[in-house]
Structure formats: structure tokens, C-alpha cells
Image (cartoon, rainbow, N blue to C red):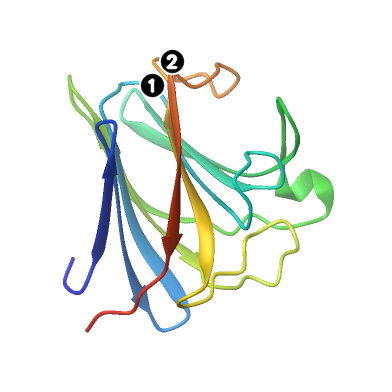
Amino acid sequence: MLGQETIQVEGMTFAYRIEGDVLRCELRAPTNGWTGVGFNSKNSIVGSDLLLFNVVDGKATSKDLYVKSLGNPMRDEDLGGKYSIELLDALEDEKSTVVRFVIPLDSGDPYDYAHELDKDFWLILAYSIEDDFEHHSRVRKHIPLQLKHRE
């Protein structure tokens, strides 16, 4: 992606580019299970906007979640919010899962993180060895970050 920023940690890669009022993203993890990315103003999974993805039999699935409490991620729609992921594509090979998606910088949904340029936030990257979203992550890392716009 031209003008992208890339973050790498524990074998996971998150790349993004700001395009107008959306964030175009690519998430890669060394797993054939689910992979996820979260956004939060504080260094915690609780209160985060969590996006989970898996690929089963070549078909990609995504979930737009808000983590109400430890071990209690809830679908935005179940809380009165809205699903706000545009899943572009996903692929899985014997070593990794890659998903490409677009989310609004600010969806207006109180359960989605409102992204602002040059403002500190926490990026959460995670993956599991299982495709079942109920399965806990094998790896979860929290990274302090600021969104930057690059031409």
C-alpha cells in the first residue's frame, strides 16, 4: 500500500493507510486460526474496539466487537451499535492468515474507536491457533501508537 504505515510485533503485521475518512488496513498473523486488531485510548483490552477475522474453507468472517469486561466481548449490534467493517478480502495458507479491510475513522458508533491523527492510542494485535472466536488468543500485544497520514 502506497503511503502506508506498518507495525510488526511477535510475527504479526498491521499496515494501514488513511484514505479520506477511512482507514484501509491489512492484518497478517502466523496462524490458521483467527486474528484480530483492537483500538483503545488506554492500555487495556477492556473498553476496546475489537475486530476479529477468520478464514474457514476459504470463506472469511469478521466480527465487530466491544469488550465490556474481561472475557466479555460483545457484538456492537447487540449493544445498540452497528457493524462497521468493510471486509475486502482474506486468505489463508499453511503458515498465515491475511485480511484486508476498511473501517471509518469515526463511525459515530459509541462502541467503535474514533481515530484521530497524531493522538496517542493503544493498538492491540492478537491471534489464536483456532478459528473459533470463543477460543482465547495465543498471542496478544498492546502497542502505543499515533495514526500518521503519509502521502
Badge 2 marks a residue whose secondary structure is: loop
Badge 1 marks a residue whose secondary structure is: loop
Determine the residue positioned at 62% across, 58% down: 41
Amino acid type, residue under disc 2 in the picture: Glu
Residue marked by disc 2: 130
Determine the residue positioned at 46% across, 78% down: 117
> In the rendered view, would you say 137 is above or below 19?
above
Q: Nearer the viewer, residue 87 or 9?
A: 9
Image quadrant where residue 60 sits: top left
Image quadrant where residue 18 sits: bottom left
Inter-mark Cα distance, 1 to 2: 4 Å
Answer few, some or many: residues within 10 Å of disc 2's Cα (few below 14, many 20 plus, some between 14 and 19).
Answer: some
Residue marked by disc 1: 33
Residue 74 image offset from top left, x and y in percent: 73, 38
- Residue 34 visible? The answer is yes
Mark 1 or mark 2: name the one nearer the start of the chain: 1
Determine the residue positioned at 20% across, 74% down: 3
Q: Does the CB distance between marks 1 and 2 fall below 8 Å?
A: yes
Quadrant where the C terminus lies? bottom left
Amino acid type, residue under disc 1 in the picture: Gly
